[in-house]
Amino acid sequence: MAESVHLNRRGVLFVLSSPSGAGKTTISRKMLAADPDIALSISATTRPMRPGETDGVDYHFVDVDRFKTMAADGEFLEWAHVFGHRYGTPRDRVEDLLAAGKDVLFDIDWQGAQQLYQEAGPDVVRVFILPPTMDELERRLRARGTDSDEVIAARMARAANEISHWDGYDYVLINDDVDGCFDEVRAILRAERLKRRRQIGLIGFARDLIRSVPEADTKL
Ligand SMILES: Nc1ncnc2c1ncn2[C@@H]1O[C@H](COP(=O)(O)OP(=O)(O)OP(=O)(O)O)[C@@H](O)[C@H]1O
Ligand SMILES: Nc1nc2c(ncn2[C@@H]2O[C@H](COP(=O)(O)O)[C@@H](O)[C@H]2O)c(=O)[nH]1
């Protein structure tokens, strides 16, 4: 049997953004459950914890002073104000995951996606998730049952602004059906992992293959 070949590859920084309620947390959870090679970047936030959330799992819940210190100390890869609170991506966890050979999943808004792209360029893959309609977006926010009417109104008011950044993304999906959208997200990740520029040592591997043919005609 032929020897199997394994090339290492650069990790993917996989960003999911959407207006609040379109379903990125739902899709993220499915991805993490289905794929041991990708792990979640756990953001720090100053927003209050929701029922069902766990500190250190869903977010690191910190107060404003702590957040400001972390930002001043350069602990964030990116951070932004969203819905009147601060949210940021701690640098250490992302670097540790990449060093361990994992891909990293980010559930962040368009401001974070832009900053991350400035930091890490083509290692970043940006996916934007749209709701099928704005009525359905509001229905999902209400059905989630985690936010007051006031919070839901603020999120709906901001949704159009968030959607207006759709063209800053590499892929745009409509989350009509969760399973269908999840399949599309997985297909994107699978294809992105195979991209030539992510394969470390591919140039040398191809060159050695060519050189291993003594009489090779490499001229066109
Ligand atoms: N395709 C879908 N059809 C119906 N309901 C959905 C679909 N996708 C997600 N939902 C539901 O919509 C609600 C909002 O989804 P979710 O919390 O994943 O949104 P989100 O984009 O992560 O929001 P936020 O930015 O506020 O965290 C949840 O109750 C989820 O179960
Ligand atoms: N720029 C960043 N945006 C983030 C980060 N973590 C989460 N988010 C985004 O905030 C909103 C609201 O999230 P919610 O959990 O309060 O509903 C949503 O769009 C998230 O994607 C972050 O570290 N940086």
Image (cartoon, rainbow, N blue to C red):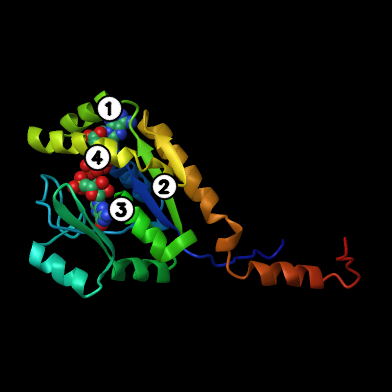
Q: Which residue is mark 2?
A: 168
Q: Are marks 1 and 4 in contact (CB under 8 Å)?
A: no
Could one spot residue 188 in this view of the protein? Answer: yes
Q: Which residue is mark 1?
A: 134
Of the four image quadrants, the one with ligand 1 is: top left
The answer to whether the beta carbon of the residue marked 3 is less than 8 Å from any atom of ligand 2 is: yes
Q: Which residue is mark 3?
A: 111
Q: Residue 90 versus residue 182: which sits nearer the camera?
A: 90
For residue 20, the mark is 4
Instruction: Measure how far apart labels 2 and 3 are at the Cα level.
Output: 10 Å
- Whole-percent x, y for residue 4 in the image: 65, 63
Q: Amino acid at mark 1?
A: Met
Drawn side of residue 143 relative to residue 9, left or right: left
Q: Quadrant of the N terminus?
A: bottom right
Marks 3 and 1, the one that precedes in the sequence: 3
The answer to whether the beta carbon of the residue marked 4 is less than 8 Å from any atom of ligand 1 is: yes
Q: Amino acid at mark 4?
A: Ser
